[in-house]
Image: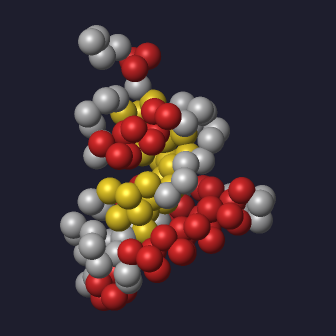
Amino acid sequence: MSSSSTDKVRASHILIKHQGSRRKASWKDPEGRIISSTTRDDAVAQLKSLREDILAGKSKFEDVASRYSDCSSAKRAGDLGSFGRNQMQKPFEEATYALKVGEISDIVDTDSGVHIILRTG
């Protein structure tokens, strides 16, 4: 398998961390106090609500990512840039490659937390 640039995808995401996340701190919760008390179910519920608002046109993905994502990519409206196979956690990679450009994933679980992914390229 060659890894030419055509094998790469580009995506943005929104990450909500929870007490099961491997790293319980983020740019908006440096001490991890909120993350440590957030259950996975609570994180999923929050993310589902944010996703519904985006799909209904009430919110823009980029704005929601900048405000709510626990990933440092929030500074870039959730943009992770381009990446190829085996560069992201497997569930995240598989979900991103399965999306068409412009599509938003359902909830994706990784060791980092729960995500929704927008494929942008």
Question: Which residue is depicted at the point 21% across and 67% down?
Answer: 22
Q: Is residue 64 visible?
A: yes
Work out whether 71 lies above or below 24: above
Q: How is the image coloured?
A: secondary structure
Work out whether 95 lies above or below 38: above
Outermost residue toward the right in this view: 57
Outermost residue toward the front in this view: 41
Question: Which residue is depicted at the point 44% across and 77% down?
Answer: 41
Outermost residue toward the left in this view: 22
**Quadrant location of the C terminus in the rendered image:** top right
Question: Which residue is depicted at the point 35% across and 64% down?
Answer: 113
How many marks on residues?
A: 0
Q: Is residue 45 left or right of residue 33?
A: right
Q: Is residue 81 visible?
A: no
Can you tell which quarter of the image residue 80 is in? Answer: top left
Residue 56 drawn at (x, y percent): 77, 60
Question: Which residue is depicted at the point 32% across and 56% down?
Answer: 110
Can you tell which quarter of the image residue 15 is in? Answer: bottom left
Residue 5 drawn at (x, y percent): 39, 18
Q: Nearer the viewer, residue 104 or 61?
A: 104
Q: Is residue 27 left or right of residue 50?
A: left
Residue 40 drawn at (x, y percent): 38, 75
**Quadrant location of the N terminus in the rendered image:** top left
Work out whether 120 lies above or below 70: above
Residue 71 drawn at (x, y percent): 38, 62
